[in-house]
Image: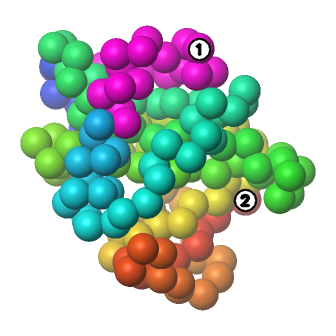
């Protein structure tokens, strides 16, 4: 794996209360900039799942506090015992192509430990996710007009 740029550090919060309010604001702002504006998907990003007790946030932050990339890890025990999902995978346009998203995703996978992990990958990124061990486990579907593919580890 390539080294991260010197100004980038990876952070993790095991509950919403551990995320500084300004940091979560910046994470939510980035998610809106990319998903709602750039990808033209009008949906309620702040869906309440960030507040769930077992939701984990992982993010890459610059020295000036900007968010370069982030993901959230959800407990999906209600769907399947032990299942985790990684979602809201987002990277700032200014920080793409630098290995930052890969570092954040690797951290998230490590955090999940031996738990099975599911994602709903934008279909054009299935090869990228496959590099991390994800395999397709269902039919492609449309979400907000964008083709997605269910993928899984474990």
Disc 1 marks which residue? 17
Packing grade of label 2 (10 A; few <14, some 14-19, many >=20) is few
Between marks 1 and 2 in the image, the one whose residue lies nearer the viewer: 1
State the extent of the magenta-drawn residues as a range. Answer: 9-28
Decide: is 30 above or below 37: above
Q: List x then y, in percent, for residue 51.
A: 62, 30
Residue farthest along the left direction in this orientation: 94
Give me the residue at 49% from left, 43% from top: 46
Q: List x then y, in percent, for residue 66.
A: 21, 24
Residue 154: mark: 2
**Mark 1 vs mark 2: which is more N-terminal?**
1
Q: List x then y, in percent, for residue 25.
A: 35, 26
Q: How far apart are marks 1 and 2 (CA)?
A: 29 Å
Badge 1 element? helix
Residue farthest along the bottom direction in this orientation: 139
- Any part of residue 88 in sight: yes
The image quadrant that residue 110 belongs to is top right
Give me the residue at 73% from left, 42% from top: 75
The image quadrant that residue 43 belongs to is bottom left
**Quick check: 17 left or right of 102?**
right
Badge 2 element? loop
Packing grade of label 1 (10 A; few <14, some 14-19, many >=20) is few
Give me the residue at 30% from left, 57% from top: 36
**Quick check: 67 left or right of 50?**
left
């Amino acid at each position: 794996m390539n080294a991260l740029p010197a100004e980038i550090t990876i952070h993790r919060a095991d509950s919403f209360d551990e995320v500084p309010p300004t940091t979560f604001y910046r994470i939510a702002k980035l998610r809106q900039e990319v998903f709602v504006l750039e990808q033209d998907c009008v949906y309620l990003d702040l869906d309440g799942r960030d507040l769930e007790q077992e939701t984990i946030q992982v993010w890459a932050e610059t020295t000036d506090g900007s968010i370069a990339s982030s993901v959230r890890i959800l407990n999906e025990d209600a769907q399947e015992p032990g299942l985790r999902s990684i979602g809201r995978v987002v990277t700032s346009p200014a920080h793409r192509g630098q290995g930052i998203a890969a570092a954040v995703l690797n951290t998230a996978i490590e955090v999940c430990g031996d738990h099975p992990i599911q994602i709903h990958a934008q279909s054009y990124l299935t090869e990228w996710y496959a590099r991390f061990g994800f395999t397709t486990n269902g039919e492609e579907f449309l979400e907000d007009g964008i083709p997605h593919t269910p993928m899984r580890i474990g």
